[in-house]
Image (cartoon, grey):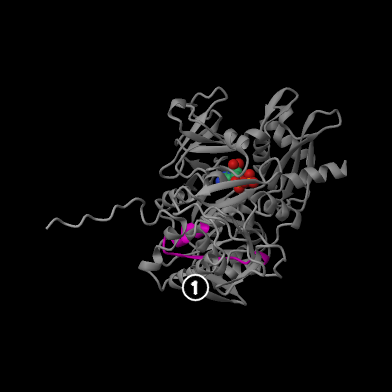
Amino acid sequence: MPATPAPEVIHRPDERFDEFLLAAAATHPDHPAVVEYTDGAERVTTFRGLRETAERYAGQLDRFGLEIGERVMIVSDTSAEAVALVLACASRGLPFVPVSPETPAERRATIERLAEPALCLAADGEPETAVGHGRFGGGAIEVPRPPSRRARSRRAVTPTDTAYIIFTSGTTGRPKGVVMSHRAVVAFYRGMMAEGFVSVGDRVASTSPLQFDFSLLDIGMALGSGAAVAPVPRALLRWPTRFLKVLSVTRATHVNGVPSIWRQSLRHIPGRLADLPDLRGVLFCGEEFPLAELRHLQRLRPGIRLINCYGATESMAASFAEVPDPLPADVTHLSIGNGHRGTDILLLDAEGSPVEEEGVVGEMYLRSPALMTGYWGDADATDAALVADPLEPRSGQRLLRTGDLAFRGADGGLRFCGRRDSQVQIRGNRVEPAEVQRRLSAHSAVCEAAVVVSEGLDGEAELCAFVVLTDGAADTAESDLRAFCLRAMPAYMAPGVVRIVDSLPVNQHGKTDHRRLLAELLTDA
Ligand code: ADP
């Protein structure tokens, strides 16, 4: 008798976002998947529990008869319930649009207007009365007035379908919706997994808001490895004692976040930081880690694995590079590596030719299966970011033009050195504010620095530096800092204005808020 042919495998069974993240529910059902901190104790949701809640939510979503591709806006912080809901949306081909509860109402309204969700679900608060607004929690979705049913023309969710849309501020201040497919996110997760950061039994503290794709990186790193994600409550993050308590109670083995999450603990309670017995790894992303702070962290935690993760929402991230332990004293730029496994970062000059020589600055282009599909409703911006392969335009392949500048170090690894769009002409010379910022940060009295460009009295562009001094360096004068710059750089690169401040403002994602610094300058003028 002829053997029954095996069913045709069209996609790998874990090519969908939710399938990939819940794979450990089959192999390690009783392991923690989400570890939450509530009232000084941990609350554990296992992989089995997470899958069950996700299935319950998916069943509830089915009641609305939504078409594949219809958006579900989720207003929530990261929690076991929120993770279950995003998994449920993904399983039904409904792109989720995460928005933080702390997002100002006006911006939330803009995102809602742009994304046109069929449903908007909030973790808490009274549901609004408009059609499709509701609440989720405890595995139940309550929608006072469900969305109207539409005709369905799609039959199956494919890996090219949209998993989520994340609205980033971009440089213009206008929210841009980064559309990511299931295939792209899973490709990214696989590339990250190949780095072997965490494994079964680990706990990854997640400090980024759900609307910042870094939180999805954390969730993917943890669940994809059979480890648990431990969301740090946003309200506790800015209090160093409470932040470290959350890490201690949830027994975090790894902490992911922007560099600023460490600032207060390094400054005020370094001893407590040295005393977290479970902590083995720190992954940072989003901006450069000020080297003085990074060295301080290394001194407190020798042997800890520090990972510099570089990338943008358009590909979730692009590279991971281990920080040498200890960081040699002469290092001025951290390596960002050369792209995670399965990706390639190309360095091109202004004419589009590859930059081969060490130390020469070019712009980074990313070739990767983890690229965004495009910007939601913005074909022009998509075409500007996803460009024809400069090496072989005939192939039809598109690369991500990152807008980020870098040079190659002696070890072959790339060094980030600023953004193309922040370069300015000062008296006819091209200046990259990040270089000036780096020089200021190298001063022994400087703890943090940020440089912005404003218009000087003569109408010309002018560099303005904001500087936070280290404890005990209060007698450092602004003129000392300018003189320090002048010792290493031409006069046009030295900031015209230097302001000593107590702290630098950070945006909702915890990155230095350059826009606010600029606004401060303008209001003071
Ligand atoms: P936004 O543009 O709104 O800040 P992203 O979070 O996507 O949104 O920001 C990505 C940008 O952040 C990158 O293009 C790069 O300029 C910067 N960046 C990200 N990671 C790093 C890093 N490890 N080192 C230096 N800069 C980084």
**Residue for badge 1:** 45
Quarter where residue 199 is shown: bottom left
Residue at image point 64% right, 51% down: 115
Residue most extreme to the front: 151
Position in image of residue 227 (x %, y %): 44, 64
| Label 1: element kind | strand
Residue most extreme to the left: 1
Position in image of residue 327 (x %, y %): 52, 47
Quarter where residue 418 is shown: top right
Residue at image point 84% right, 41% down: 522
In this orientation, does residue 230 appear? no
* Residue 294 colored in magenta in the image: no
Position in image of residue 358 (x %, y %): 49, 29
Query: Viewer-proximal residue, 490 or 152?
Result: 152
Query: Viewer-proximal residue, 150 or 360?
Result: 150
Ligand 1 quadrant in view:
top right
* Residue 232 colored in magenta in the image: yes
In this picture, which residue range is highlighted in magenta?
218-235
Whether residue 218 is situated above or below residue 288 in the rendered picture: below
Q: Say whether residue 390 is left or right of residue 259.
A: left
In this orientation, does residue 473 appear? yes
Quadrant including the N terminus: bottom left
Query: Viewer-proximal residue, 491 or 308?
Result: 308
User: How crowded is the residue under tag 1: few (<14 C-alpha within 10 Å), some, or many (20+)?
Assistant: many
Residue at image point 78% right, 32% down: 462
Position in image of residue 315 (x %, y %): 52, 45
Q: Say whether residue 105 is left or right of residue 273.
A: right
Quadrant including the C terminus: top right
Q: Mark 1 belongs to which amino acid?
A: Thr
